[in-house]
Amino acid sequence: MPTFNVNTVDWDELYRGEASYAPGDPGWNIGNLQPELAALEMQGRFGSPILDSGCGVGVTTLALAAKGYDAVGLDLSAAAIDRARQSAMEQGLSVKFDVADLSRSTGYENYFATVVDGLVFHCLPEELREGYVESSARALKPGGSFFALVFATEAFPPGAEFGPRPFSEKQLRDIVGAHLEVEDVRPARAWINVPAVLPAGFEYRNVTIGADGRAQLPSWVVIAHKG
């Protein structure tokens, strides 16, 4: 059976619900803001304009727009962007969604006050990570903030061939710190919908099932800013 591999995944196929290894919506589409990101927003850490980097079907973008932020959503998948635009129309929200290869450029320079990455960074192949952080840094205004929720190595078996590429704290500090000033990398939990069947070769570790029935996986929150 085919399985999720960040080096070969067809994101349009995945978001159209046609991937045999991930039927339906991807597990990270929980329908609202990730709790770790929602906590940062409640602390007043976000400012407009805000980029939802790797926005998928626009859940985070639309949630922030509904709170009054000037929000933009960008994603590599045209299928995901089509769904995001449809959701914006249905909710009556004015949000800009576009297709972009974020490992190369967001199409914005010194524009955003905030860049938010909700479970995207660990889906990038290794060779694209530095370009992704560098393009995020270019998109930020001086002093602008970068927040990322990223799976920790404890979430998956050591040396796992399939699935997202989790990170250690040092890896994140090194990669993000090459282009942004890292303020903190702190332990966190990422919420995902529990799949009925795990793809072949895929395994979670150290999972907690919350009262809402969602799985909570070990993660990191990265907080950085553009100098």
Image (tube, rainbow, N blue to C red):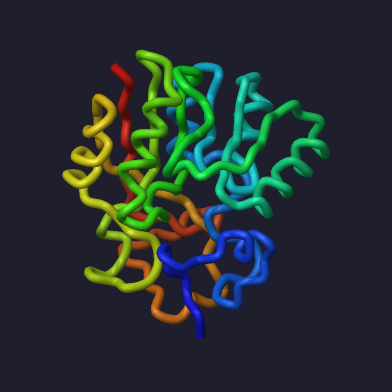
Looking at the image, is 215 positioned above or below residue 102?
A: below
Which residue occupies 27% across, 70% down?
157
Image quarter for residue 123? Answer: bottom left
**77 left or right of 191 in image:** right
Which residue occupies 39% across, 79% down?
201
The image shows residue 67 at horizontal and vertical percentages of 64, 23
Which residue occupies 21% across, 50% down?
168
The image shows residue 82 at horizontal and vertical percentages of 73, 48
The image shows residue 175 at horizontal and vertical percentages of 24, 41
Q: Is residue 172 visible?
A: yes
Looking at the image, is 132 positioned above or below residue 183?
A: below
The image shows residue 88 at horizontal and vertical percentages of 75, 36
Q: Nearer the viewer, residue 158 or 111?
A: 111
Looking at the image, is 126 positioned above or below residue 2?
A: above
Which residue occupies 26% across, 59% down?
154
Image quarter for residue 20? Answer: bottom right
